[in-house]
Amino acid sequence: MCRISEFLPVLLIAGSALLLAGCTSYYNPLDDYEQLEPATILAAPDAAPGSYPAESVARGRYLVSLLGCGSCHTDGALVGAPVPGHELAGSSVGIAYSNPMATSRPGVLYASNLTPDPATGIGDRSLEDLVRMIRLGIDQHGGETIPVMPWPAYANILEADAQAIAMYLKSLPAVRHEVPANVRPGQRATAPFVYFGVYQSRQR
Ligand code: HEC
């Protein structure tokens, strides 16, 4: 009869060889990262009275709170705590958009400053520019944005609602805050970033 105790030393040796092989060949890029709590949904800040109809600006504020724009577009919202006075003024922490299992140097986008600061924010964008970005992900140069900014989810928003969001953003107090430049896959990111996403194992 075959008893397990007779095979125990063999099993142990085979087991440690496997473990050794594992240690030398297996690299999990996620080991370099820590897991964070999901982003907070932030209330949209007050707008200053300006040239746009007050009802539209109020509607825009309501939609920006509801759609959670601030949870990407605010310093400290992705990691840590939202920085007071920097609501919607862009994020110094980026969001990676390529597969973390495939590369340790993913492409990274930094959510823009959405306050009307002329140098670092949306000061020079027209209402039409902003509406196209929100509904179609088309930037001011006519290029399509990588859908880290979830414009496909906003594509069916009513024109009047997209306009209201744009009017609200243009009515925010301007905050001067430059976000880091976007990073292409393979380049080294010089500012921190997080990963969003759902990853399915290929092993069935
Ligand atoms: C999941 C994160 C995320 C959410 C949520 C999000 N955005 Fe963005 N947004 C981004 C990123 C990242 C960029 C930068 C894209 C780029 O540089 O290619 C961006 C860019 C933009 C721009 C372009 C700004 C410019 O300088 O041209 C506008 C406008 C904008 N977002 C508005 C919004 C609005 C309005 C909402 C809510 C309805 C929103 N975003 C929600 C991540 C997000």
Image (cartoon, rainbow, N blue to C red):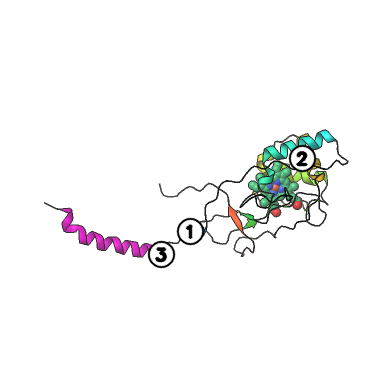
- The reply to whether the residue tagged 2 has its Cβ within 8 angstroms of ligand 1 is yes
Res 47 quadrant in image: top right
| Residue receiving disc 1 | 31
| Residue receiving disc 3 | 25
Identify the residue shown where x is 68% and y is 39%.
Answer: 67
Along the line of sight, the residue nearer the viewer: 40 or 24? 40
Give the amino acid type for the residue marked by disc 2 in the picture.
Ile
- Disc number for residue 165: 2
- Residues at marks 3 and 2, CA–CA distance in whole angstroms: 51 Å
Q: Is residue 26 left or right of residue 147?
A: left
Q: Is residue 46 above or below residue 182?
A: above
Circle 1 SS class: helix
Along the line of sight, the residue nearer the viewer: 154 or 49? 49
- Residues at marks 3 and 1, CA–CA distance in whole angstroms: 14 Å
Q: Which residues are magenta?
A: 1-27
Q: Position of residue 59 (x, y in %)?
A: 77, 34
- Disc number for residue 132: none
User: Which is nearer the N-term, disc 3 or disc 2?
Assistant: 3
* In contact (CB < 8 Å): disc 2 and disc 1: no
* In contact (CB < 8 Å): disc 3 and disc 2: no
- The reply to whether the residue tagged 1 has its Cβ within 8 angstroms of ligand 1 is no
